[in-house]
Amino acid sequence: MNCLQLDDIHISYGSTAVVQGLGFSIAKGDIACLLGHSGCGKTTVLRAIAGLERIRSGQIVLAGRTVSSSSEHLAPEARGIGMVFQDYALFPHLTVAGNIAFGLKGRTPAQRDARVSELLELVGLAGVAARYPHELSGGQQQRVALARALAPEPELLLLDEPFSNLDVELRERLAQEVRTILKQTGTTALLVTHDQHEAFAISDVVGVMHQGVIRQWATPYQLYHEPTDRFVANFIGEGVLLPGKVTGPQCVEFELGEICSVVPRACCPDCHADGQIDVLVRPDDIQHDDASPLKATVLARAFRGAQFLYTLGLPSGHKVLSLVPSHHDHRIGEAIGIRMEIDHVIAFPRQSTAHGHA
């Protein structure tokens, strides 16, 4: 059963269309994400779901009830939606317990206290109930904001760039912790972010947005291995496009060899008449193998702790990226053996300017 459904949503600011024909649904208990660059419309969609923006056409249905359409607009406070903001929006004059209890209207003091204690335990802050927000770290403040949003048991939780004020290492760890909490409580959630690592750490399904439309709505794994167009291939992960040609219904051939895949991602029906294509090659598709007859030259290297990301030059002059365990420490200019290990063939009709980074 869907908790949230958007059908053909259009949102404009004056004569400027911000969101155009957007639609998706989120199953009850799932965590979804709208991922995209600043200005792509993702926060506008979040605000429309919350009731803070009116839609021009289409409809938003929450738990089987239409909350927004061209003729209907349910007030934000009547929607049963919780929100976690980028700046946390905690009340500085209230304690941690007071902040969490703020939305618990209509309950007895004993019920409020029990719910606050339950949530403090859930978010790992049982010992800080009497502290004030300014006495907490950024990560702790974010947990308080989450607990406050979860306290009334909302139908849907919206998270607006919730980790952007935290350092990179803490972001991903806290995203995973938040995912665990949301799954424990069975909460349906929608996150907006520009950070794909954050999106992948927390989400069951992700919509990649660009210029007010969703280019692909899929699992993180599918977005990485099965992008539906060049934009998604370029936006998600790292990779390069190498020229190749279609050699069969499930096969493509390019400089590194021929690949035949049981789940073809080649664009055969849409390819140019001559079968010329560009093949997407990810860093994890290129394995370091000293025994391989195929050699590539190390042009650049970036140390990432457990791995090096090598930029390698092929005999043709094209470049590929390769993730290699960091105990394989090769100098710039050194030739190393490589081999392909590609499970998903991703190819697009040839564009003469496409070669290089995807």
Image: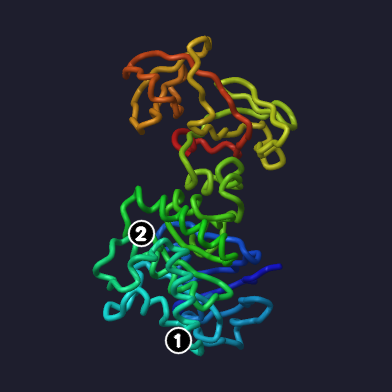
Q: Residue at x 54, y 55 (%)?
A: 203
Reply above or below: 146 against 283: below
> Where does residue 39 sit, x and y in percent of width and height?
41, 63
**Mark closest to the chain's N terminus, 1 or 2:** 1
User: Which label was assigned to residue 109?
Assistant: 1
Label 2 Cα neighbours within 10 Å, binned few <14 / some 14-19 / many ≥20: some
Q: Which residue type does callout 1 highlight?
A: Pro
Q: Quadrant of residue 87?
A: bottom left
Question: Residue 5: in sight, yes or no?
Answer: no
Reply above or below: 210 against 266: below
Label 1 Cα neighbours within 10 Å, binned few <14 / some 14-19 / many ≥20: few
Question: Residue 213: in sight, yes or no?
Answer: yes
Local secondary structure at mark 1: helix
Q: Quadrant of residue 37?
A: bottom left
Reply above or below: 8 against 257: below
Q: Which residue type does callout 2 highlight?
A: Ser
Residue at label 2? 164
Q: Residue at x 47, y 19 (%)?
A: 316
Q: Residue at x 64, y 81 (%)?
A: 66
> Where does residue 38 sit, x and y in percent of width and height?
40, 60
Local secondary structure at mark 2: loop
> Where does residue 107 sit, x and y in percent of width and height?
50, 87
Viewer-closest of 39 and 200: 200
The way the protein has been coloured in the rendering is rainbow
Which residue is the extreme one toward the front? 110
Viewer-closest of 354 and 266: 266
Q: Residue at x 68, y 68 (%)?
A: 2
